[in-house]
Amino acid sequence: QDASTAEQTIAAMTKIFGDHPGKRSNHAKGVVVEGSFTPSADAKTLSKAGVFSGAAVPVTVRFSDATGLPQIPDGAPEANPHGLSIKFKPADGSEMDVVTNSLKTFPVATGEEFRDLLVAITKSGPGTAKPTPVEQFMAAHPNAPKALATAKTPSSFGRQVFNGVNAFILVDAAGKRTPFRYRIVPVAGEEILSADDAKAKGPNYLVEEMPARLAKAPVAFRVEAQIAQPGDSTKDATVAWPEDRRFVDLGTLTLTKAVPDSETAEKALLFMPNNLPDGVEVSDDPLIDARVQAYAISFGRRSQ
Ligand code: HEM
């Protein structure tokens, strides 16, 4: 993608959400916690990466709300999709970032389309003649409303399923390549709130509940890989693969404690979808590069 697309994407986000110095252009509100990842026995048969070699790996995790609004109420519909970002930090230094959200599929397949959607939002304020630019975008991209309809507000960040959406590739020691998508499933099960219950929650119920929950007991997620079959598109995040595709358990994420100062911790953190060790590779999904470019610009802005 042309470098200017990412610039235009960030400019549109800033127009929609306002300028909030030091904050992320999207997923501005979040909470940082720590724990470890213990790979399954199967993981190392699919990937030679150090994170899957057998020993438990320390992780830093950030849960977040969508939008560039640092004060968005956690239960607002616009706070969907929520995000789960994981930084795996194995002793051999081969860091890996996994950045997921709570949609089953993504509204658009390319960075250009995402920019176009955001620009359409900037032109669809109150009083805009119907059909508004956003309504026109949705009509022309039927997978977008379909993806957004999978948004759900959970009772806790620890009770929501998160999806990688983009395809990546596991590579084993013999060079065998396995295209897959992440699905991260809470061991306690998913627990979704009704629209009324979500509305009744306090503005910070998710970001405050996670540290409180961790003070009592760990929170666990199963990290799974949905394995593509020949013919499953790795470059269209708007289309889910059939549910009967095999899910391989890659391991268990166990979160154990909040960081003492989440605001300071999140400022220094940058999760990059292409920050991968030997043994995990990006696919031909164009959204990955679009994300990498946009995240770098957002990080540059918020680090000033
Ligand atoms: C072209 C598509 C996309 C664009 C332009 C985009 C843009 C952004 C930007 C600018 C940020 C702030 C980055 C930072 O300052 O560190 C961000 C954060 C985030 N995005 Fe995306 N995004 C895209 C697609 C996705 C997808 C497909 C997912 C999930 C599968 C996702 C999940 C997240 C999450 C979880 C965060 C928060 C990261 C953190 O905790 O630091 N995004 N996105």
Image: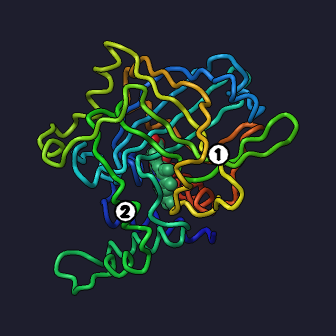
Kind of residue at disc 2: Thr
Residue 251 on image: x %, y %: 59, 26
Q: Residue at point 62% right, 26% down? A: 89
Left or right: where 193 falls relative to 171: left
Picture quarter with the N terminus:
bottom right
Residue, far right: 174
Kind of residue at disc 1: Ile
Left or right: where 219 falls relative to 213: right
Which numbered circle lies on residue 248? none
Ligand 1 closer than 8 Å to label 2 CB: no
Q: CA gap, disc 1 to disc 2?
A: 37 Å
Q: Residue at point 44% right, 35% down? A: 62
Label 1, secondary structure: give it. Answer: strand
Q: Is residue 304 visible?
A: no
What residue is disc 2 on? 14
Residue 213 lies in what quarter of the image?
top left
Residue 261 on image: x %, y %: 37, 25
What residue is disc 1 on? 227
